[in-house]
Image (cartoon, rainbow, N blue to C red):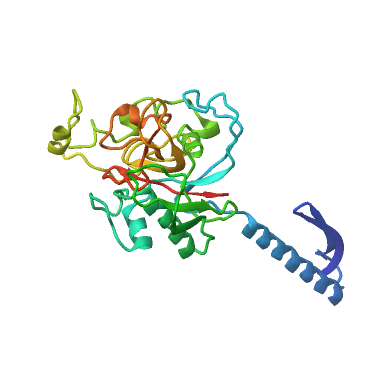
Amino acid sequence: MTCELSNAAITHGGFTFKHPAIRQSGHRTLHKEDISMSRLLIQVITAMVVASACSQKKVPDNFVLVNGGETFKNTKSNYYGKSVTIPDFYLGKYEVTQKEWLEVMGNNPSAFKGHKLPVEMVSWYDCVEYCNKRSIKEGLQPYYNIDRNKKDAYNTNDLDSIKWSVTINEKANGYRLPTEAEWEYAAGGGQLSKSYTYSGSNNVDEAAWYWKNAGNKYLTGYWAWKLLEKNNNKTKPVGSKYPNELGLYDMSGNVREWCWDWQQPEGTAAPQGRTWKGGGWIGADFCCASSFRASLEANGKGPDQGFRVCRGK
């Protein structure tokens, strides 16, 4: 039995490589230079395959790739029918947990303790600091420029005693808060939306932890703080409810989630604040609707105020 060389071709990445391929026959004829060439081409092709695989961006752990679009499919969205383009981005599958916060910030400000519980009692300023510190820890470029010594001239909220100047590095690959439009697009199911009222369901109890179901028993009647205290209402471990169409959990309920945007409540004398979305364990069912929007002074905190992070693709 011998080996002969015949022409063969390998196609990869749109390129075709022709080289001698060894085949068996009845003669013992072997050319060393042909074998060397074959080995060299195989090594080149292997290197290209490895490089190609490495160049394809892997979805980060516990994140979901949200494919953007030029239209909002959810008919209940504030942005439905409007010309708003959402780029592709990665969004946290869960709200930031206390374990994740502790690993980055070295403390746990939450009122309810538990590694799998969402972090709460965090201000908007706390959250942008977290984003930058986590980015640095993971070797990413920080998304925010935070100047603690410069007051934000746009911030007219007298309840906010901090008023740090915070601007963005638009091309940075680090962690950040989603914009309100990004948040609502993702909560509403993106391009896979089934136009649910809440994130992933029209049944609030399937999708959200809110004042009626976040305690020892299911509450009825009218909201009253004493009822919630007596019922031991509190946050729940992230991912305990059904996910939405994109595989995102707790976009409705559990804790309210900070967004990047400023909001000036229309038709009211309320001061401007940073937007929050999604509702929480203290609030009513209508606060858990994906389209509901409200705001709070950026230095505000509460046992139902948390966040989730995103990154550009």
Residue at point 26% right, 53% down? 114
Q: Position of residue 77 (x, y in %)?
A: 48, 27
Image quarter hosting the N terminus: bottom right
On screen, residue 137 above or below 204:
below
Asked whether 9 or 204 is in front, the reply is 204
Viewer-proximal residue among 29 and 200: 200
Is residue 17 found left or right of 80 in the rendered image?
right
- What residue is shown at x 40% (from left), y 50% (from top)? 163
- Specify the quadrant of the image occupied by residue 37: bottom right
**Total tally of numbered discs in the picture:** 0
Regarding residue 31, the answer to whether it shows in the image is no
Task: Tell whether 270 sits left or right of 215.
Answer: right
Identity of the residue drawn at 12% across and 37% down? 230
Task: Examine the rendering and report whether any part of residue 173 can be seen.
Answer: yes
Q: Nearer the viewer, residue 53 or 177?
A: 177
Q: Position of residue 151 (x, y in %)?
A: 43, 53
Is residue 132 toward the left or the right of residue 231 in the image? right
Location of residue 242 by image quarter: top left
Q: Position of residue 174 (x, y in %)?
A: 52, 56
Eyeballing the image, is 5 above or below 234?
below
Closer-to-camera residue (252/120): 120
Q: Position of residue 312 (x, y in %)?
A: 56, 49
